[in-house]
Amino acid sequence: MPEININGLKTNYQVFGEGAPFLILHGWGSASERWEKFAELIAAKGFKVIVPDLPGFGKSDQLSHVWTTNDYTNWVEEFIEKIGLQEFYLMGHSFGGALACKFAIKYPQKLKKLFLVSSAAVRKHTSKKNAYKFLSKIVKGFAFLPGYDFFRKAFYKFIIVKSDYPYVEGNLKGTFLNVVAEDLSQFTGFIRVPTIIIWGDKDTYTPISDAYFLNEKIKNSKLIVLKGFGHIVNRDCPEILSEKVLENI
């Protein structure tokens, strides 16, 4: 696995095949190794697939301080410069999809096409989310009690259900809060790159309604719905995912 240094952070990444460059940004809590099957399928059709471990994940270095999505987007800029990418295909899954959106808005000239897979770019502040935020603050007030860690994890597992927060450590905790607080809904309309939106209709993390929203906001876009699949389509149906990508490359 190749390794480079970006602003003092060791970055591990994987490269599959040769040909037109195809960069994949994985989701929160994921890593390049979880994209190997999909990457091999795309590489077999004449592409050079590059999958980095984002800082804080996989075999890359942990964060030395709390980051924002802008920090991650800047890191992507540094990464592509370091490995010499000029014009390429970009795919972002979940959290990586939010980064891909920001990159596409800032550097449309660098992208041949954008693929958003279950992208976590839409984080609208609903009354339900506000209520969860209020409850989370109350839970933090009991941090002095014995057994707090167990209680906190139980709260997120059974009440918040879909939150990754109790499973992150160190600077990723503050980073996670920064990430989930940023809603890119109002900016997605500025994406001008040809975009393919791919979504599982059983996705409970990034609901299918987000896919239709993005399809409406991004004018030059096409929506592909994968029937019967959830959020982690790279793991659950890499063959189908790669087929849809190659059909729309």
Image: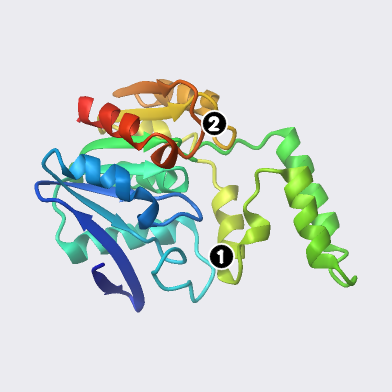
| Residue 172: image tag | 1
Q: Give the camera-side residue of 11 and 85.
A: 11
Residue 180 left/right relative to 77: right
Q: Secondary structure at mark 1?
A: helix
Horizontal side of residue 57 vs 140, given as left or right: left
Residue drawn where x is 65% and y is 48% of the image: 163
Q: Do we see residue 111 in this rendering?
A: no
Closer to the N terminus: mark 1 or mark 2? 1
166 to 161, vertically: above or below: below
Looking at the rendering, in which quadrant would you find the C terminus? top left
Toward which corner of the image does residue 209 lie, by quadrant? top right
Q: Residues within 10 Å of mark 2 (few under 14, many from 20)?
A: some
User: In the rendering, at what x and y percent does residue 223 appear?
Assistant: 37, 22
The residue type indicated by label 1 comes to Leu
**Rendered location of residue 203, percent (x, y):** 54, 31
Q: Crowdedness of circle 1 by 10 Å Cα count: few (<14), some, many (20+)?
A: many
Q: Position of residue 239 (x, y in %)?
A: 31, 33
- Tag 1 and tag 2, C-beta contact below 8 Å: no
Colour basis: rainbow
Residue 178 drawn at (x, y percent): 57, 56
48 over 5 or under it: above or below: above
Residue type beneath disc 2: Asp
Quarter of the rendering occupied by the N terminus: bottom left
Return the residue nearer the eye: 249 or 14. 14
Residue 59 is drawn in which quadrant? bottom left
Circle 2 residue = 203
